[in-house]
Image: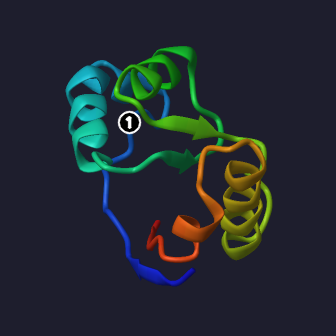
Amino acid sequence: MRFIGHRKTDFYCSGGDTCGDGESVLTKTIRALEGCEVVLCSKVGYEPWGQLEEAGIIPNGEHAMEAIEDAVMAVYKEMIENGRLDEQQGTQQKVTA
């Protein structure tokens, strides 16, 4: 596994009055994440979580407080163990964060 890049997204909601336009920001964020199977996240609300799932992206908050390298490796191993990633194919997968 190797890091190949990152995808910049705007904050969906940072509290107070910034959540009013969240729907358009969330739509843009999901579009930017197209092609990702899993998104590592923390403090994701029900609406964004559901919309990510509807877009075929699995939100994962189980490793939110871990170092990114450890979190990515943990999710990668979980995907292999759960049959979501063919182990041979998985060794050739690229990682985007």
Q: Residues within 10 Å of mark 1 (few under 14, many from 20)?
A: many
Horizontal arrangement in the rendering, residue 57 relative to residue 64 (left or right): left
* Residue in the picture at 52% in, 84% down: 2
Q: Residue furthest front?
A: 88
Query: Vertical placement of 33 versus 14: above or below?
Result: below
Q: Quadrant of residue 22?
A: top left
What amino acid type should be assigned to the residue bearing mark 1?
Tyr
Please provide percent x and percent y for residue 73. 72, 68
Q: Nearer the viewer, residue 63 or 19?
A: 63
Please provide percent x and percent y for residue 47. 47, 15
Horizontal arrangement in the rendering, residue 42 relative to residue 14 (left or right): right
Horizontal arrangement in the rendering, residue 31 relative to residue 73 (left or right): left
Residue beneath disc 1: 12
Query: Vertical placement of 68 versus 56: above or below?
Result: below
**Which secondary structure lies at badge 1?**
loop
Number of numbered tags placed on the structure image: 1
Q: Quadrant of residue 42?
A: top right
Q: How is the image coloured?
A: rainbow
Q: Quadrant of residue 94?
A: bottom left
Q: Nearer the viewer, residue 69 or 12?
A: 69
Quarter of the figure that contains the N terminus: bottom right
* Residue in the picture at 21% in, 38% down: 28
Please provide percent x and percent y for residue 41. 60, 46
* Residue in the picture at 66% in, 65% down: 72
Please provide percent x and percent y for residue 50. 48, 17
* Residue in the picture at 47% in, 70% down: 93
Q: Nearer the viewer, residue 44 or 83?
A: 83
